[in-house]
Image (cartoon, rainbow, N blue to C red):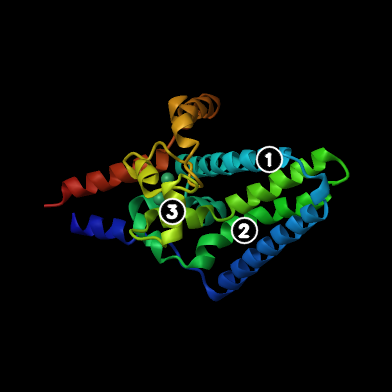
Amino acid sequence: MQRVGNRQASRRHDGSGPLTFWFETLCIVTAVAAILAHLYRLWQHRHDLSLWMLAAILLAWLAADFVSGLVHWLADTWGSEAFPILGPRFIKPFRVHHVTPNSFLECNLVDTNGDTSLVALPVLTALWMIPLSHPMGLFSLTFGVAFCAMAIPTNQIHQWAHMRRPPGWVRWLQRRGLILSHREHARHHALPHEGHYCITTGFCNQWLEKIKFFRCLEAIVTRLTGVRPRLEEEQSRSYVRTVASRQP
Ligand SMILES: [Zn+2]
Ligand SMILES: [Zn+2]
């Protein structure tokens, strides 16, 4: 059992090499600069802004949480760590996180926020194409910028939810449900990791669980493809059980 335990415990998050570190730093700096530039564009049209912009921000707050759940569910449920590029870069970190949740705390600021910044860059670039001469353009840009500003720190918020003592202002935000709390996220970490996937604010979790949103999606995917959800994780768990049962 000891060897199996060690094998499982040795699954940790990969750190980044110097090249990845500088590339991720560049992604974070560029994403933050793009958000500031878009905010400046909105400021230039401040006289045309209306209460609809508040609705756009609220919608973005919900959408960022929902998309975080959808992406998390995809990585937890389908595919294999052996897939080229996507496997080690996207799927493996989610699976490793189930085995050794606290090794995520060893990731530095750049490791934690680099990937989400990279993914947000095409969206932030596309936002430049929105014409601001029409109220709908202002609404769309407000939504897009707010969405990126809330989605980029998702991994950071997730990491804070694992900390025993996060900074005081983070605890304040967690207590008010403005970002994911430790308590809400602990529900996802209960075996077999089949729910509460949203990790930005966690607000959507209760509603998605109530309507069994992800179970319905899984039933549709299985019906269309014949693939069972969480196949790789199930196989790895049953492998661990089998080896453990053979230990003297
Ligand atoms: Zn998960
Ligand atoms: Zn977690």
Q: Crowdedness of circle 1 by 10 Å Cα count: few (<14), some, many (20+)?
A: many
Residue 94 visible within the image: no
Measured as percent of width and height from the top left, residue 150 is found at: 59, 50
- Residue 97 coordinates in the image, percent (x, y): 39, 53
Q: Residue furthest bottom?
A: 18
What residue is drawn where x is 66% and y is 48%?
146
Mark 3 crowdedness (10 Å alpha carbons): few <14, some 14-19, many ≥20 = some
Outermost residue toward the right in this view: 133
How much space separates mark 3 and mark 1, taking CA atoms? 24 Å
Label 2: which secondary element: helix
Please state which amino acid type lies under the numbered disc 1.
Answer: Ala
Residue at 76% x, 55% y is: 125
Give the labeled residue for mark 1. Answer: 56
Question: In this rendering, would 242 be left or right of 76?
Answer: left
Q: Secondary structure at mark 3?
A: helix
The answer to whether marks 2 and 1 mark residues whose Cβ atoms lie closer than 8 Å is no
Residue found at x 65% / y 67%? 29
Instruction: Give the amino acid at mark 3.
Output: Trp
> Observer-nearest residue: 173 or 240?
173
Which quadrant of the figure contains the N terminus?
Answer: bottom left
Left or right position of 142 against 165: right
Q: Which mark is residue 117?
A: 2
